[in-house]
Image (spheres, rainbow, N blue to C red):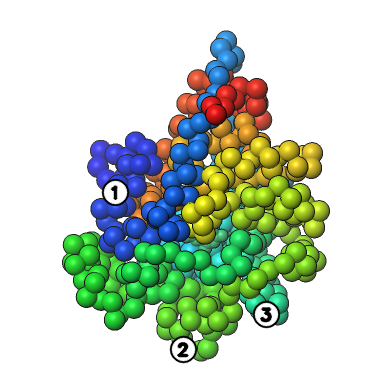
Amino acid sequence: MSGVSSALNIEDLRKMAGRRLPSFLFDYVEYGHADGASVARNKAAFDKYQMLSRVLVKVVPPDTRRTVFGREYDLPFGISAVGGLGIFRPGADRFLAEVAREANIPFMLSGVSTESIETVARIAPDHVWFQLYPAREFALTERLIGQARNAGCEVLVVSVDYPIQNKSEVPQRSGVTPIGGIDWAKLPSIAGDLATHPRWLLEFLRSGGMPKMESWMPYAPAGSSPKDIAKYFASVWPPNLVWEDVERIRALWKGKLVLKGLMEPGDVSRAYEVGADAVSLSNHGGNKLNIVPATVDCLAPARDVAPEGSTLFLDGGIRRGSDVVKAAALGADFCFLGRAFLYGVAAGGRDGARRVVEIVRDDLSYTLAMLGIPDMYSVDPALLVTQA
Ligand SMILES: Cc1cc2nc3c(=O)[nH]c(=O)nc-3n(C[C@H](O)[C@H](O)[C@H](O)COP(=O)(O)O)c2cc1C
């Protein structure tokens, strides 16, 4: 076995990604906000939940399917929105769409993706959801929604968790962000990093250098460079959204609507009141603040206030199939993985993303069988044991 096929778990892929990527990119992913406490907490929090196993149950093979919004997916997890993927691996958005289609799982295309929504939705029309970052001007938000509709997306995921631009210390130091590009004035400080990651550098240069946010090209001035498009984006985003904005979006979007980035129970119940079809509990993978609780710890309180039968998603810190089972026991209908797929695609492109699906799927099946759980609908909260 060689390359990504030798990875046994997501941690193996993380290490491979760390070897290929310059530190200014890898650390950007690893730290999230400030010292990375929330990134670490999201992951570590899963350890305090354990599951009792039942025996003498017919479980082979376990049924991992799960239906969301009337569509049956083969697995109870999907690919979360990650912006600026092209700098990590040219073609990454396309690879993820291909893998989502093959594996029959959803792929949330980031509102600041590298490849355009049109290109990506064409690859996997039944699997691509569009994650919207609304603009300050509602007229522009309306056009973005129209773009998603015309591309054939059935699910709109509105990320509502950044009232202001997030801050990360890593790019302030390096001068590089996946969507903002490279501040060449800081080149001397990253030159050594570039020189010691020649595989990444060669592919970056061969693919034309800094990638563009293609979905934003129709709005930025004609002939804009990647940096100009990023500048334009920074001039229209973020808006300080309020509930009335969500109501306007709800009135406009006839498809399924997900609100992403909620944690607080009052917000969760209000989201359903204003007509969201699902809530995605998320702290943006620890990218927004280092003082927020792990999202898995927000699940039970959110489920308590969510209306009977409502759809609840979780992301944050999920690295194993067993994490997905724990999340289901705590009340999540479906999970999304951000970094796991980022590591996979950065380490090995399309094959790396496929390997993520295999790893998480196999661990999920193994866990279900060993716990004596025949299918995803039979994950019994009574099996959950929580350590204080
Ligand atoms: C590098 C990076 C970029 C991200 N970009 C976006 C984005 O464009 N839109 C969005 O809604 N969430 C974005 N997220 C958050 C993810 O969608 C998801 O909430 C988070 O990664 C889940 O945590 P995990 O990485 O531990 O799986 C990003 C996360 C990372 C790590």
Which SS class for mark 2? loop
Where is residue 223 shown, x and y percent of the image? 46, 88
Q: How many marks?
A: 3
Kindly report which numbered mark, 1 or 3, lies closer to the viewer in this rendering.
3
Q: CA distance from mark 2 to mark 1?
A: 37 Å
Where is residue 56 shown, x and y percent of the image? 57, 10
Residue denoted by label 1: 16
Which SS class for mark 3? loop
Residue denoted by label 3: 137
Residue denoted by label 2: 223
Residue 30 versus residue 171 in the image, above or below: above
Dividing the picture into quadrants, the one containing residue 62 is top right
Residues packed near mark 3 inside 10 Å, few (<14), some (14 to 19) or many (20 plus): few
Q: Which residue shows up at 51% across the image and 31% down it?
A: 48
Q: Which residue shows up at 78% across the image and 67% down it?
A: 244
Question: Is residue 52 among the parts visible in the rendering?
Answer: yes
Where is residue 214 shown, x and y percent of the image? 50, 74
Q: CA distance from mark 2 to mark 3?
A: 22 Å
